[in-house]
Amino acid sequence: MEELDPTQYYNNRLASLASLPTSPYSQMFRVSMTFDHYREKFKGLSNGERLAETTVSLAGRVMSKRASGSKLVFYSLESAEGTIQAVSDARSLVGGNFAAVHANIKRGDVVGVSGNPGMSNRGELSIFVKEIILLAPCLYMLPKGGKNRVSKGVCHCAVCSSFLTQDEQATWRPGKPRNPNAYVLKEQETRYRLRFLDIIVNPEVKFVLETAHSAVNYIRSFLDQRGFREVETAILNSKAGGAAARPFNTHHDASEMDMSLRIAPELQLKQLLVAGYNGVYEVDKQFRNEGMDLTHNPEFTTCEFYSAYSDYHDLMTMTEELLSGLVKKITGGYTVSYHSNGYDSPPVEIDFTPPFRRIEMVNGLEDTMGIELPKDLASEEANEFLKKTCEARGVYCAPPLTTSRLLDKLVGHYLEETCVNPAFIIDHPLIMSPLAKQHRSKPGLTERFELFVNKHELVNAYTELNNPVEQRDRFVQQLKDRQGGDDEAMVLDEDFVKAMEYGLPPCAGWGMGIDRLVMLLTDSLNIKEVLLCPAMKPPEAVPPPNEKGTPQA
């Protein structure tokens, strides 16, 4: 039956299950311990030892089935905690015909087993089956590795193999190179749509996705230890503020009010500093109605925090401490391997050892490009100068050609490209930073920094503007940009300005994209690799893959 066409296999499996005297979908099966607990408790058994007086119950998915003659069957059972071997022989099975019981169990089925703990003669911890029950059959043929396929996507190129130990090459961990092209199920469209199947047949995916959990836990602990309070702000708002982005818009029928999904929690978090909190943070989803590419998803996770009586210098130090400590905790060191140029090329080493390099934006542009920027970057003359500069240098900027957008393109082309190891680009022009405080000693600039790693922005932070009069003026300028066609310019938020009028203490704010951080830690070139449920365009239909891991036509 295993060699049948997938559709024929599905139909035959349904017919076979329908002929059983009882339902193959069990009401309940009580497990006595997890796989981790089982391994820990019985790992000290000797080869060939079996605890005949001890009975335990485990449950898992059958990932392989192998018969040795007609009286002995070996199963590899998998759960969230890994794999345990189940050994069933005709002499020990209680209840039912041995051949009939095992004939109804196929690869992919979820089963429950009760039996005796033991160690095989070859030293593999096993459970010697007394009873095996089909709990939930799998109706499809699971993809399986052939001669040249592996279940783990550890990168085995010559460069990676040269510095990975034998154990590291067998099991991937965060910070080390990997290669999804070596997975059993490789086709991305199928993997991302059928994420449950991706996790079942590509065990490494589970560890990639769990890296986000580890990172968020570390960030929460870091901030909690420094006296920050975690809060939750509204996802639905009458106005989408706090960032330069296009929102998702909706309508609340009961209140007859247009609303937007939040694009950032910044304005609400800063109002809590007005209320008297010294430090607040939020780890949550943001929603931006923009394009999708290798590093952008319309729904993504961020961490933002705001600290009263701090400035951007303090936050640069905190950023170095947070990220270097996080990388060390999760990977065991300060460097991560990342295939920046594709999985077919050797990975680069990204070093998070502090301190991080600092690049002044305006001076850095002038030095790198060999030009002198206009002193008044808010002037029409500056805008014309930047238009001509971009055109002459072959740097394309999509309309509207605002000064902020033109500067951003030049920075991306000339400065961000130099930031492989973590580097701060600091002191942004005022025209690019509507919520940041003016620099205390550099007119026309702000106390702002962005952290770039592997040439991509990871963190954005600044000393916060706390003058309500100046804040309203900047919102008005943003409104002019919006009326000029820039639909990513910020909206005027009178509620936030009103809160500032009650007194926003001197403070600094910080935001980081969690998904991009996890991409770096897991050598993921596509943001969908680190999202449990990435946004996907509607398919015509997603057929089940065959045994080779490719979808059926």
Image (cartoon, rainbow, N blue to C red):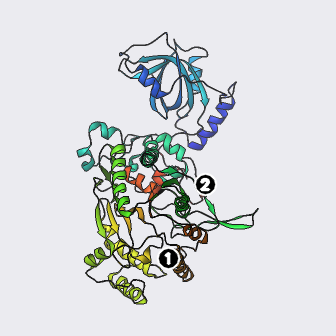
User: In the depicted view, which residue is nearer to us: 386 or 470?
Assistant: 470
Q: Is mark 1 on a helix, strand or loop?
A: helix
Label 1 vs 2, first from the N-terminus: 1
Viewer can see residue 207: yes
Q: Is mark 2 on a helix, strand or loop?
A: loop
* Kind of residue at disc 1: Glu
Q: Dot 1: few (<14), some (14–19), or many (≥20) neighbours within 10 Å?
A: some
- Is residue 354 toward the left or the right of residue 391 in the image? left
User: In the depicted view, which residue is nearer to us: 96 or 11?
Assistant: 96
Residue occupied by mark 1: 470
> Percent position (x, y) of residue 198?
50, 45
- The disc placed on residue 541 is 2
Q: Dot 2: few (<14), some (14–19), or many (≥20) neighbours within 10 Å?
A: few
> Percent position (x, y) of residue 109?
56, 32
- Relative height, residue 429 to residue 103 (above, below): below
Q: Residue furthest left?
A: 162
Q: Distance between the residues labelled 1 and 2?
A: 54 Å
The image quadrant where one finds the N terminus is: top right
